[in-house]
Structures are given as C-alpha cells and as structure tokens.
Image: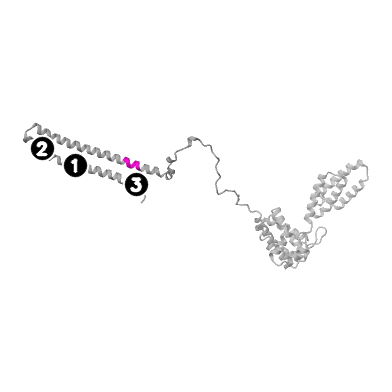
Amino acid sequence: VAGASDRPSLGSVALGAGAMAAGTGLARGDASELRKRARRQLKEAMVARDSEDIEPLRVAIEVACEVGLDERDIARARELLAKLEAKDRSLALTDVSRDDLERLKAASSREEAEGILIRCMGLSLHDGFQTEVLAEFHYHNFLFTQSQRLNAEQASTFLSLMRHLHERAILQEAMSEAAARELFDDLVRRHSRQLPPFSIAAFQEEQAEAIRAYAERGFFKHFRMYAHVYKQLPVLAVTAVEKPLVPEVPAIQPLHKDFEVDPQEVLELRDLFPEIEESADEGAADAALTSSAGRLHSHSATSRSSGGAARGAGSFGSGGSGAVSGASARGHSAGSARPVDSTTKAEVEAAIDSVLQELLPPLDARISQLPE
C-alpha cells in the first residue's frame, strides 16, 4: 500500500505501548525518556487518514495520557480520532429508529409521513422553502425503501446515507457534482461489504446497484437544483418603518408682540368680516358719485361761460352803434346762439349718462343685498 511505510503498524504500536507500560515501573529519572517516546509515537500516529489507522491512533492517545503529555497535543489527536470514527461509523439506525419506521409505514397520509421524517432528520420549520424541499427529498427516499422491500436496518441506513450525502455535499462543503459522486460511492461501498470493524454490509450487491441507479435519476439529476436552494442570494430587503398618519406636532416657538397683525387686513380672513366689503363698496360708490358730480359741474361752468360771452358781445354791439346796428347785432347774436345751446345740451346729457353708468352698478349691487 502506498505510504504504508510512513505509518506506524498496529504491531509496532502495541509493542511500544507494552514497553511504556513496563517502563512505568522504572525509576523516575526515566520519565522524561518515556514522555519523549510517547510524544514521538503520538506524532507518528497523527498521520492517520483511513479506517485502518484508527486503532494505532487510539493506542497512542492512551499511552500519551498515561505518561502525562501536554493536554494540547492529546486534544488534537482526539479530534482526529473522532473525525475518523465519525467518517467510518455505520449509519444504521442513527436517524430513524425501528419505532419511527413502523410509524412511517402506518402513516395514513403524506403529510403525516413528512412530519415524522422532519422530526427524525432534525429539520426546522422556520427554514420555510428549504425545509419543504428536504421533506419531499426524504419522503421519496422512504418510498424507495418500500418499493425495494428493505428491512428496518436497511431502510434506516439508506435514509441516513442520503441525509449524510445531502448534508456534506450541499450544506457543509458545497462540493462539485464529481466530488459528491465520489462521496456517495464511498458510502455505498462501505455499507455493502462485510469487513468489520471497518465496514458492515447493510446492503446486498443487487440492492447497492439499485441504490446507485435511484440516486442517479434522483439526487444527481437534480443536483444543481438542490445546490441552488442553498445558494440563492437575497434580492429584496424589507424594513418596517413606523410612519404615523398624523404628522407630529411641531415644537412651540416663542411669540412676540411685533408679530401681531390686524385680522381685517388679512385677505384670507375677509369672509369673516362682511362689513368691510360693504364699507368698501359704499366708499367706491361715493367716490364715483363725487367724481361724476365734479365733471358735471365743470361742464355746467363751461356752458355758462360760453353763453355769457355771447350775450356780452350782443350788448357791446348795441351800445356802440345805432338802432340798426343794434338790431344787426341782436340778429347776429340770435343766429349764433343756437349752435352753442345745442352743443352745450349734448355735452350735459353725455355727462349725465356717464355719471349714471358709473353709479347704477354699485346701486344695483347694494339693492340686491337688501332683504326682500
């Protein structure tokens, strides 16, 4: 066997253990030599890799404890021994007991059987979708044991074998498909040959072939899917933030007298003071009436001054001339007075119309507000 010369044989370890056991009766001065020899033997046994290396490692640990080596060196050897023993330990009746198999056979529904398998395999319902996938995985494995008519030991071994395969290949080590196949072949080979204490034949050769074919069309066909279930990355992060419907009341700020304003001057508050609008309308109407009266008065003064000028011209003509000249002047004055009077009348009427047009709309608005 390659590398066999580098490993301590079982006979040499046994001889070394016997020598050290005999050496315990020697003088205390030889204690350091015994510890040195035990340390060297433990170091040689620490190269253990396979099943045949388990027993030499166990003997070396016992000798190291007897001579009182450092506990740190012994702890590392114990960890290696536990790992090798776990690797070569038989999986029969490790997860599913005989009683659990009887309950699985007596289950009246798929949900009941999956509940038993979830409990036996140590699955957590909090994992959600992942637990559902594994529950279906173990349930189909159980159906395979029933179709192959496996006994209790064989069925329990197969269920634990598939659990061990999924746990190491997908969860713990994230193996490639080729590495997972090697692990599966090693598990099946170890449980299909009778070579104690290294392996115990739980399956016959034809049963082992059926198990390989089942894993090929089941687990390895969907290997990437099982791996993806545990490799998916979160794409959505939801954070709950409490946001009240009513906004928070702002902090109270100090007020000053200079901040006060007259509410009657605020445009948004005009509807609360109707008397302000009425007084404003009355003021506008009075202003319009005053303006119209002023224009009417100016027009009347203009008319009077024009008429007075005409009359003065007539009297001046009659005083400076004779009767004929006075008659002519009066005739001329009478003839020129008509167009002046008609123009003045038109201007007066126009002024009155403009005043009425300015006064009537405010009066109509005030009249419409009076109670009926």
Span of residues in magenta = 282-287
Numbered disc in front, either 2 or 1: 2
Give 294 or 275, whichever is nearer the viewer.
Answer: 275
User: Residue 160 at what x, y percent from top left?
Assistant: 75, 60
Amino acid type indicated by mark 2: Arg
Residue at image position (37%, 44%) is 278
Amino acid type indicated by mark 1: Thr
Real-space CA distance between mark 3 and mark 1, rounded to the nearest whole angstrom: 35 Å
Residue 277 against residue 97 in the figure, above or below? above
Residue 333 against residue 224 in the figure, above or below? above
Residue at image position (18%, 42%) is 342
Real-space CA distance between mark 2 and mark 1, rounded to the nearest whole angstrom: 20 Å
User: Residue 22 at what x, y percent from top left?
Assistant: 92, 47
Amino acid type indicated by mark 3: Arg
Task: Label 1: state its secondary structure.
Answer: helix
Residue 330, disc: 2
Residue 178: quarter of image: bottom right
Q: Residues at badges 3 and 1 in contact (C-beta under 8 Å)?
A: no
Numbered disc in front, either 3 or 2: 3
To which residue does mark 1 refer?
343
Task: Label 3: state its secondary structure.
Answer: helix
Q: Residues at badges 3 and 2 in contact (C-beta under 8 Å)?
A: no
Residue 174 against residue 109 in the figure, above or below? above
Magenta stretch: dominant secondary structure: helix
